Amino acid sequence: MDAGVHEAMIMATPMPFVIAGAPGAIFWAPLLGLLAGAIVTLVARSLPARGRLVARPVCARCDGDLPWPAVSATARMLGFKRACPTCHGGPMPGDVWLEVGTALAFTVLALRWPAGPTLAVHLAYAALLMVILAIDLRHREVYLLLGYGGVVAALALAPLSMSGAIKNAAFGGAIGAAVFGLIYLVGRVLYRGREPLGSGDITIAALLGAMAGFPGVVTALTYGILAGGISAAFVMLRRQSRHTFIPYGPALCIGGLLALLG
Ligand SMILES: [Zn+2]
């Protein structure tokens, strides 16, 4: 193993989980997370279907309009405005998981970080990563509005986030884009022109870098590549083929979520 790889592995070694947040977070963070999760679900459905960041909630089964109070899939699962007025279907399990996942991420982050602007930025990043993850998983697409909009927001919020300063956020973003740009090119050569990972993954890597700065970007990409490797192994075992699409985008989002703890 060469020195650079070894150094990167040391930098990416997970820190012990320190609880610096108020214990009361265990009460408010899941509720705030469910609320944010409903917005995450709404954006993840309305952007691909209607081309708008926020649109009136629609039934994921029949595309029929839902009343606004049905915006939370979790509330629907629990019986509130459960049935769609058009097809009488319930909420999609994937949407419920997305909301519960967001609530879980919010709770862990609120226990990890003391209440304040830095925590607020971490929570906003988590919500954005959940939206990108869900859309990429369903449509294999990264919306530039979310990806590059996120990079711009991360540069603006750098003084409040992990990256520390705008220069550091820009440096981290450049590293993320360069590393995944290189992996993308090597992949295209190895796979003879076919794309083993999407070009959107470069956008996500840049976003993670801008969020985490340097050396946080190393942690985020290492977690992302590990998660991507595990999911690729699963995909190959199930399909018995080496030439399948690797869901790197969602794996990178999970890497970014884990890096928010660091
Ligand atoms: Zn319906």
Image (cartoon, rainbow, N blue to C red):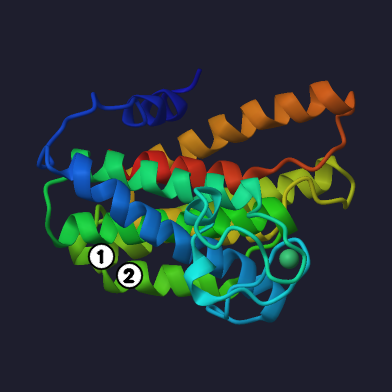
Whether residue 138 is visible to the viewer of this picture, yes or no, is: yes
- Closer to the camera, 61 or 197? 61
Secondary structure of the residue carrying tag 2 is helix
- Closer to the camera, 98 or 169? 98
Quadrant hosting residue 53 = bottom right
Q: Is residue 224 left or right of residue 234?
A: left
Name the residue beneath numbered marker 1.
158
On the image, the x and y values in percent for residue 97 come to 54, 44
Image quarter where ligand 1 lies: bottom right
What amino acid is found at the position of numbered circle 2 in the picture?
Leu
Tell me: residue 242, above or below residue 185: above
Secondary structure of the residue carrying tag 1 is helix
What amino acid is found at the position of numbered circle 1 in the picture?
Ala
On the image, the x and y values in percent for residue 1 come to 50, 17
Name the residue beneath numbered marker 2.
155
Q: Which image quadrant: the C terminus?
A: top left
Whether residue 147 is visible to the viewer of this picture, yes or no, is: no
- Closer to the camera, 244 or 254? 254
Residue at (43%, 68%) from the top-left corner? 151
Residue at (36%, 72%) from the top-left corner? 153
Tell whether label 1 touches label 2 (CB within 8 Å): yes
On the image, the x and y values in percent for residue 248 come to 64, 44
Calculate the distance from the C-alpha at mark 2 to the C-alpha at mark 1. Answer: 5 Å
Residue at (82%, 46%) from the top-left corner? 189
